[in-house]
Amino acid sequence: MMLFVGVDVGAHGGIAIIDDKGRVLRAVAMPTTDQDILDVLFWPSREMPLLACRAVLEKVASSPQMGVVSAFSFGGAYRALRMALTAAQLPFDEVKPFAWQRRLECLSGGDKNVTKARAQQLFPGTKIAHSTADSLLLAEFGRRQWADSLTLSSRTSVGAGSGKGRETATATAFSTDADAPTAPIESLGDDLGDLFRKE
């Protein structure tokens, strides 16, 4: 069994944790204090210490529409979440919105209702808010990439043992789509505290 953490940066973002069957273990709006963020990220190692865990952090950029203070604050919040994941000893990948939304068939164009509807489809029975929808989908993206890597590994092993010759291949489990557009974040607060304000 393995756990997957999705981290959606921003004032209306959140953190979600699912298992390798796609079951939701936790889904919360972005905590408002550093300690509360750490408490959520340390939950896997505290509650399920024997299970491996991997996180997906949405890779986003400031928007030209932001003021200087807002852009600076957003960058600080993003770095703070990277540090929090490191402190919690969670291996993580940074994935652009276009990459995970394309994989999960929910290209939103910035409309959170699109990703909320998709999260409701994938996690029936779970109460989905705008603050938790993207984080759940990020965790699901990580789960699917992990499953794909297992399938690739299995096929490679079967091919090697069949006498057909082993092909050498390099696979990246978590594609960040470097050439894909990075979605800007609009309407962020003017200070770091605003960035972690709940909806």
Image (cartoon, rainbow, N blue to C red):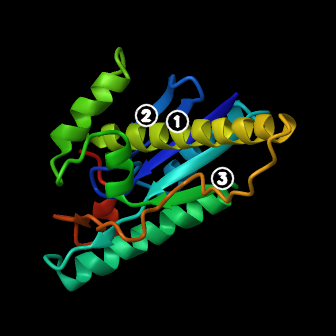
- Is residue 45 in sight in this rendering? no
Q: Nearer the viewer, residue 131 or 94?
A: 94
Residue 100 % position (x, y): 39, 49
| Mark nearer the N terminus (2 vs 3) | 2
Q: Amino acid at mark 1?
A: Ile
Residue positioned 69% across, 57% down in the render? 169
Residue 52 position (above or below residue 9): above
Q: CA–CA distance between discs 2 and 3? A: 17 Å
Q: Tags 1 and 2 in contact by the CB under 8 Å rule?
A: yes
Residue positioned 29% across, 47% down in the render? 198
- Residue 27 is marked as 2
Which image quarter holds the C terminus?
Answer: top left
Q: Describe residue 28's horizontal placement relative to residue 127 as left or right.
A: right
Residue marked by disc 1: 17
Report crowding for label 3: few under 14, some 14 to 19, many 20 or more residues within 10 A (C-alpha).
Answer: many
Residue marked by disc 3: 90
